[in-house]
């Protein structure tokens, strides 16, 4: 598969593909790649892969989307993708699922065809949409690659849904209509079914009210974990007691809220150590730690390695 992709690249592209990753002073954060500005709470955007990737010679550098969920659907062609520290190479049809805050980058074979869907989770989960909250939790629980068989019913259905979504999104009379949101929920629900089918264990189910509440917790955590909010503040913002918040989070993840916040912070530290060229002390301050020595102890407690050791090990991988 990798050989097929590299054969499709021009000599210039092959030379570029073997070049080292660009050194970054900080990992860029976008609502949409290359566009500055904070994400709109009601953002729902879909575009063809080629519409943006051609502008960047079919290569999208490492970046993150804070508070936004993204799905890349590759119907045809090949892609080399980086999701956090994982590297994958695959051909279509395939869906790459990118939760908020996950560092990602893509290198496409020229003329690859597909779609990129970017959405704010709150928009999908609000209201009485049956199954929307659970589908979001199932699909975006982790970065994942969902490979489908060519011309399978699932692949054809997803391709058709995304084509319809793009058409609706571009229609002048659909900007404030409900159809794009309905179609997006359908895409997320279909992909969640595939993800659930692929999971080795049964997914725990929350009630409809709990689904929406847990989604609000995830969105709030993504927006504020770098500020090191205490769990009591999250509970207050959600209108819950600390005990109830911990119980809800533990039922879904097996961890209490504080442990999940620490795991999220450690995951962000891993990303920055790999993708951002900056001293450990500077990264510690950016991650909200007042004492770099305490950050080093925190990081080693969660990963088993000191920050510099982790960076060196990942650079050698």
Image (cartoon, grey):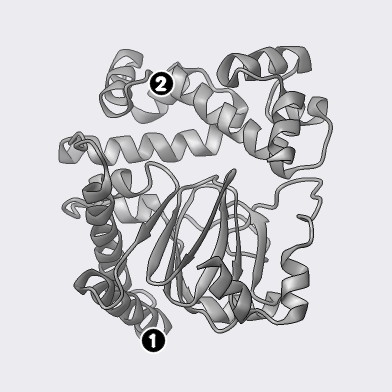
Q: Name the residue under label 2.
A: 257
Q: Mark 1 points at which residue?
A: 171
Sequence order check, earlier mark of 2 and 1: 1
Please identify the residue farthest to the bottom as the structure is shown: 172
Q: Residue sitting at 33 percent across and 27 percent down?
A: 253
Left or right: 104 as drawn, with respect to 210 = right
Question: Label for residue 122?
Answer: none
- The x and y percentages for residue 28 are 70, 52
Q: Which residue is at the front of the view, 109 or 261? A: 109
Please identify the residue farthest to the front as the structure is shown: 3
Report, in whole angstroms, how far the alpha carbon at label 2 lies from the one at label 1.
42 Å
- The x and y percentages for residue 295 are 70, 18
Left or right: 303 as drawn, with respect to 152 = right
Q: Hey, which quadrant is residue 175 in on the image?
A: bottom left
Proximity of marks 2 and 1: CB atoms separated by less than 8 Å: no
- On screen, residue 30 above or below 313: below
Q: Which residue is at the front of the view, 21 or 291? A: 21
Q: Residue sitting at 29 percent across and 69 percent down?
A: 149
- On screen, residue 146 above or below 154: above
Q: Badge 1: few (under 14), some or many (20 or more) residues near its Cα, within 10 Å? A: few
Q: Hey, which quadrant is residue 46 in on the image?
A: bottom left
- On screen, residue 265 above or below 111: above
- The x and y percentages for residue 151 are 26, 78
Q: Residue sitting at 33 percent across and 49 percent down?
A: 139
Q: Which residue is at the front of the view, 271 or 19? A: 19
Classify mark 1: helix, strand or loop.
Answer: loop
Q: Badge 2: few (under 14), some or many (20 or more) residues near its Cα, within 10 Å? A: many
Q: Hey, which quadrant is residue 248 in on the image?
A: top left
**In the rendered image, which quarter contains the C terminus?**
top right
Front: mark 2 or 1? 2
Classify mark 2: helix, strand or loop.
Answer: helix
């Amino acid at each position: 598969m990798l050989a097929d992709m590299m054969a499709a690249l021009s000599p210039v592209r092959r030379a570029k593909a073997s070049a080292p990753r660009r050194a970054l002073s900080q990992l860029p954060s976008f609502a949409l790649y290359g566009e500055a500005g904070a994400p709109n709470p009601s953002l729902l955007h879909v575009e063809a892969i080629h519409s943006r990737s051609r502008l960047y010679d079919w290569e999208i550098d490492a970046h993150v989307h804070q508070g936004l969920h993204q799905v890349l659907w590759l119907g045809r062609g090949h892609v080399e993708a980086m999701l956090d520290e994982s590297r994958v190479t695959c051909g279509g049809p395939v869906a790459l699922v990118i939760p908020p805050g996950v560092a990602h980058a893509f290198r496409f074979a020229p003329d690859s065809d597909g779609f990129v869907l970017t959405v704010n989770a709150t928009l999908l989960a609000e209201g009485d949409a049956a199954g929307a909250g659970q589908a979001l939790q199932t699909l975006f629980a982790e970065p994942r690659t969902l490979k489908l068989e060519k011309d399978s019913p699932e692949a054809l259905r997803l391709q058709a849904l995304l084509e319809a979504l793009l058409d609706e999104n571009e229609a002048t009379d659909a900007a404030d209509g409900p159809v794009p949101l309905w179609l997006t929920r359908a895409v997320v629900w279909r992909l969640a079914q595939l993800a659930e089918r692929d999971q080795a264990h049964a997914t725990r189910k929350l009630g409809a009210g709990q689904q929406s509440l847990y989604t609000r917790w995830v969105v709030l955590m993504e927006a504020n974990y770098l500020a090191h909010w205490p769990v009591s503040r999250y509970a207050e913002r959600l209108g819950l007691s600390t005990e109830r918040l911990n119980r809800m989070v533990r039922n879904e993840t097996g961890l209490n809220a504080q442990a999940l916040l620490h795991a999220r912070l450690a995951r962000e530290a891993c990303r920055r150590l790999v993708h951002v060229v900056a001293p450990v002390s500077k990264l510690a301050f950016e991650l909200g730690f007042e004492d770099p020595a305490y950050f080093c102890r925190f990081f080693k407690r969660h990963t088993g390695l000191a920050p510099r050791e982790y960076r060196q090990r990942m650079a050698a991988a």
